[in-house]
Structures are given as C-alpha cells and as structure tokens.
Image: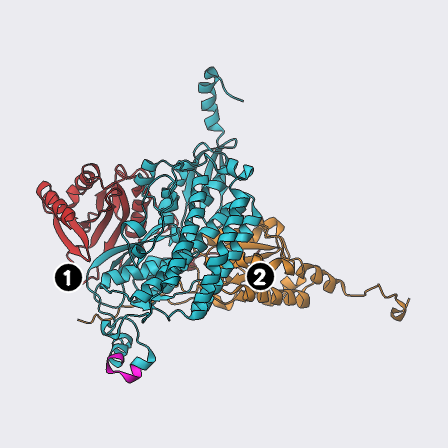
Amino acid sequence: MSIDAELVKDLKSRFRDVSDSEFRGQTRVVVRRDECFSVLEYLKVDRSFDMLVDLTCVDYLNYRDATDRFGMVYLLANTVTGTRLTVRVMLNEPDLTVPSVTPLWEGANWLEREVWDMFGIEFEGHPDLRRILLPEQFTGHPLRKDYPLQGRGERHNFPVLTRREA
Amino acid sequence: MAIEQLPENVVVSRLDALGSWCRKNSLWPMPFATACCGIELMATGASRHDLARFGAEVFRFSPRQCDLMIVAGRVVMKMLPVLQRIWQQMHEPKWCISMGACASTGGVFDTYSVVQGIDRFIPVDMYVPGCPPRPEQLIQAIMDLQDKIQHEGTIAGSEFEVASRQQRKRALMELPVINSPQPAIPRH
Amino acid sequence: MPLTAVDTEQTTQEAQDYLWTLNFGPQHPATHTTLRLLLKLDGERVVDAVPDIGYLHSGFEKIGEHLDYNQYVTVTDRMNYISPMSNNVAWHHAVETLLGIELTPRCQYIRVIIAELARISDHLLSTGAMGLDTGAFTFFLYAFYQRERIYDIFETLCGARFTNSYTRVGGVLHDITPLVIEKIRDFVRECPKTIDDMERLLNRNRIYVDRTKGVGLLTKEEAINRSCTGPVARASGVTRDVRKDDPYLVYEDFDFQVCCATAGDCFARYYVRMAEMRESLKIVEQAIENLPQGPANVGVDERTALPSKEQVYQTIEGTITHFELVMANRGIEVPSDESYAATEAPNGELGFYVVGDGSDVAYRARCRPPSFINFALFPHLIRGHTLSDVVAVLGSLNIIAAELDR
C-alpha cells in the first residue's frame, strides 16, 4: 500500500532506528524506547491516527530467536481513512519503564494499568498506576512466562466456612 | 377423638414434614450469577422454562430475603470474600446450589485466579454439572433439592447440625501446583 | 433548592465533607455482571464514580498460551457470553489471518449468518436488560423469547444452546443442514414483528424516554479519544464499522447500512441497537437466499481442517492430512510472526493479536476487549447525573464482565 510505504519512509527520515516489516498486509514499525512518545505524538497529531485501538505487551522469554524480553505493542487506526499501523517498542530488564500515552489518548489509561498488572511494566506519567484486574494484595505479574498457569497457591488461600460457622 | 373419626378436610402430619413442605415450595433464590451460567439462570427464569412454577418466583437480590443461593458461574479469588460474606448474611435455613462446572470444580479454568470449586469455601447442597447446564438441568437440581429438603428437613433446622454437614468437603484436598506444560515441539 | 451565588462557595467546602460513598456491586441486581462501582454521592447526584473490576478475571490470555488453536475456541465462547458465536468467528478470523488461509465461500456465508444471528441475540439481551433495569419487564421477556428461538437454531446447528465452539481453523465443525436453513427462514420472517412490538413498548414511552434522553452524553471526539467502538461510538456519530471499513468474510457482497446517531446519549445507543438488529436480519436473509454450494471446510491440501471420514479412509491425501493434524509434534504449520485481525462484534471491535511461534499453540493470544474499553468511559459519562441514571448508563454501555475482566 503506497500510503503505508510513504508513511514508513517519513518515520524513518524523522526518527532514528525505525525498522519496519509487513506481514499479511499489516505494517509494523519498531521504534526505540526513548523516542516512542515522540513517534506516537507525531502519528497522532500530524498523521491523524486518532484512535488507539489496543495497547498490549508480549513477553518473548521462551520465543526462539528473540533479542529482547518484552515488546510493547500499540495498534493505531485512522478513523477517517481507515489505515492501521502497529508500533512496537522493545524493552529489556531491568529497565522496564515506558512513557505513558495517556496524554495523547485517554483510552490508554486502563489499557496501561492492565499491562502493569499483568506484566509489570511501569508507565511514566500515568495518573493512576495500580492494579486493575487482580486484587491489590496480589504479588507477581501473571502473564509473564515465568509465572505458572495455576498460580502459586493464591487461589487456595481463603478461610473455609462450614455450616457451623455460617 | 380417634383418627378414623376425623372429618375429610383434616390432615394429620408431622410438624417437620409440614415445615419442610412449606419451605421447599417457596424457595426464593438468591442468584449469585457471575458468568455464562448466569445467562442460563436468567433463561430458566424467563418464559420458556419458567422457574416460577416451582415456587422460585422472586429472584430477590438481597441475601436477607432469600433462602437459596444459586452460584452460577466461575468464582474468582477476588470475588470469593464477597461470596462468603453474602452466604453469611443469609438467614437460616439456607441452601446452596453450585451451578455449572466452574462453580463446582473450577471448570475449564484451571488458572491462577479461579477458585477450583466453591465447595472448598462454602457448604454446598446440590451440584449441577454442565457448561452451561441446560435450564432443564437446573430445574432438575431444584426439584432434587426440594426432595432433599422434604426428606431431611426439620422445623428447627437441626439437619444442619448433623456431623456430615459440619466437616470440610473432600474437595479441599490440596492439589499439587504443577509447572506450566511445555508447548508442543515445533515442527521445524 | 437552588443555591445563590453567595452561598455556593461556603457550602461547597461543607458539601465536600458530606459526600457519601455508596458501594454498587459486585453483586447487584442492576449490574447483571460482576463489576463494582464506588459512587461518591452528593445527595442523589453522582459526583464521582470509581470502577473496581477484576471480579471475573480468569486468566483467559494465559490459557491461550497453553491451548491449541482449535481448543482455544471453547474459551473464547466464554468471553462475551451473550453472543459466543461472534467471538468464535473473531478468534478464527485472527488465526486464519495469521496462517494465511482462504476459506471456502460456503464457510464464509455460514460464518456471516452465525455472526449476525449472534449480533441479534446480543442486542436483544442488551436492550432487554436495559429495559429490565429501568423497569420494563415485558420488554425483557419479549427479547428473551426471541433469544430462545436463536438458541433453538444454534442447538439444531451444533448441539449447544450457547457456548457452542462451532468454528474451526479452516472451516466449521460441520456443515449447515436444510433443517437449520428452514429454522433460520422462519426466524427471519417472524423476528421483525417482535422488534416492532418491542419498539412500540419503549420508543415513545414517556418514562423510558425521560430516563434515557440526555443521560450519559458522549461526544464524537471523546469517543474517538477514548478508543470506543461499536454501538456506543456509532451513537455519538463515529461512523466506523469494521464490516465496512476493513471487510472480512463476505460482507462486501451484502447490502446493509451502518446505523449511526448523533445524540450520544443512552436513548441513542438503545436506538442504534434496535436499528442494527433490523440490518442484521436483512443480512441473514440475503445470506440464506444466496448460500453457495460446496464444501464448508478448506480442502485437504491446506493441511488445516480435519478431513471427513470418507476422505480419510479413501484418499491418500485425506489420510496424510489426518495424521499431520492429529499426531503429536505435527499439527498446523504456523509462521513465527504476529498479526492482528478484528471483526465487528456486537459490542464493538473485537480483535485478537496472535503471536505464533511455529508450534500448535499460540505464543500470545491477546483479545482486544470492547467492553473493557467502553467501561472506562463510565466515570466520564455519569458525572453530574443522579443515582437512578447509573443503571441506565450501565445498561446502555452493555458491559459483559467476562470480556471486561478476561
């Protein structure tokens, strides 16, 4: 698609280290973490990608040929022309912080809280970063690959009520 | 006056049986509907499979006004204290139906956050298998519960003092926490 | 009693001390799902609403990393449990996009039919529940009766009333039979009368209109900024529908309209859903009349769908495909890459971001949940309204807890 190719060329000329790929008709760009906010701001303001469709993360711990541990994924869409773009930011331990995009898209508020809850990635500048899906007292980040599916016994840790007590 | 001489419009019975008959025919359910089974619970209460025929007309959402708690759907560890609190708020005599596979054993979800069976933490009287159970199954469970109430029920609720109801369920055995299984070996 | 300008400043400070926190849920009749709201009330006015979710978080995305592409469809059923077929279609659409599989025409038509029936079922329940929560019980029963007819169709098709994991990679579980087509034709003929009845009950009902008009206003810019999709966004003027913008399956072949409104309040959302039901009936009618002949699953050469038993026993390709798919450490050939594919679920844009790693099990199966994103709107919509409007707004957003928490 010519629009996407031109967009990618534009991004590559403005920002350093932007790599792109295409798969099944979808254009993905990988940007550096220190530029990701500027890239997303540019895409929103100058390129009118006004809707943030989704914001998620992938843990590449067990992935073959993976170079980084975490990959943040931002799915953007332009509601007027209908173009979509995937922006990825790679992160490594121990420095798992990323600037929050809540100032750009208000819908990112809860999506970032969920990524913090599930993966443990901190978002700088997020107004209210706390757990959203799991209880506040929960420790651990379940969607990481080193967390077992059945948990570490948290689900059994409750008082029992028999007929005598209740 | 001897029994043979009673007129036809007099019935003699035990107080326990009479009390149980009244209670079983007016079970007011407290729907603790969390997930998909909640929709089948609503369908059971809707017009085609009408639960109101069995006396369960009013789905009161206040625990103070109900006697039957139907836990329909998976119970997550964040929700379990709420479930226990509502159970404690219900007045005696009270019964519990665990509807669906997720409430009975955890169902499809053997994960870090789903409680593997509410009978680990709440006393349960009737289990309904299914994912989700058809409305007919739920109605059968309520009818079986009505039989249970009729046969075991006492006016003072002393059936709940029986030792077998006081102990923890066998399902409370600790399950071993296994490591996540490795995915299938890739082809190339 | 209206306050004069002199009084306002003094009483605001006192009023701050008297804000009353009401805990709404997680077990509550109006929310037919398990979500919790902490409402800060000033008398009857809601000053702030803090949602607290996670009471149904079951680890769906973690399960996706341990189940096959065909096994996970049973779990997607349980996400938006009001319209499970649309989740199945969405999941397999995403998987087939990743694998690059082209479906047979008959399969595409079947999937369109079941997705639209699921949409009708979802809208019937969401409007029905909205009616129930605002007091219209008859409306709810009419809606449920039609939903039972849709359940009959699904039961005849695949055996389960709902949570029917009907789609498979490369096709569907089994082909559609003439009896099912007959039932769908009957349904399409009779459902419009019920929708007319339902509209007659509520559209000009003074109580309902007063409770929903002007309540929960959402502007178009806010909707886009907050990533809203689906009827919630379309009722605010965002003319975005994945079926028209990024057509998938065979939606390009059908003549239907995207229903939008500009008011952005609860009544507009209800009205958009009622109109969408009629459009879906049109699509189902067109699809049923033009259903192409041919196989429902992709051919054996694709090595993705299980072949029929005749093919397995009588042709060599069938046998090979059967072995390839069933034996351990064989299976579907999956590229080591990631892709995102979205469909228009009744609640909004339901997409799956699937990361494949060469094996039969997804490496990451992320669901883009429309209910989760729509629920984040709630504090914004309810500010300044009264306690009784909470129920109307919550009903109009159609929050399904299982999709909200996953």
| Label at residue A102 | none
Which chain does the orange colour mark?
A: B
Q: Mark 1, residues whose alpha carbon is within 10 Å: few (<14), some, or many (≥20)?
A: few
| Label at residue B49 | 2
Q: Residue furthest top?
A: C6
Distance of label 2 from label 1 (alpha carbons): 56 Å
Kind of residue sitting beneath label 1? Asp
Q: Circle 2 sits in a helix, a strand or a loop, which is it?
A: loop
- Nearer to us of marks 2 and 1 is 2
Task: Report the front residue among B109 and A49.
Answer: A49
Question: Magenta segment range?
Answer: C312-318
Q: Chain of mark 1?
A: A
* Figure quadrant of residue C170: bottom left
Determine if residue B93 is in view.
Answer: yes
Q: Chain of mark 2?
A: B
Kind of residue sitting beneath label 2? His
If the image is split into quadrants, where does the C terminus of chain C sit?
bottom left
Colour chain C is painted in: cyan
Residue C54: percent from left, percent from top:
40, 50
Q: Mark 2, residues whose alpha carbon is within 10 Å: few (<14), some, or many (≥20)?
A: some
**Chief secondary structure of the magenta portion:** helix
Q: Tell me what residue is drawn at x 41 percent, y 58 percent.
A: C285
Residue A5: percent from left, percent from top:
13, 48
Task: Report the front residue among C63 and B153.
Answer: C63
Magenta region includes residue C315:
yes
On the picture, is B53 further left or further right than C388? right
Magenta region includes residue B123:
no
Mark 1 — residue?
A: A65
Number of marks in the rendered image: 2
Colour chain A is painted in: red
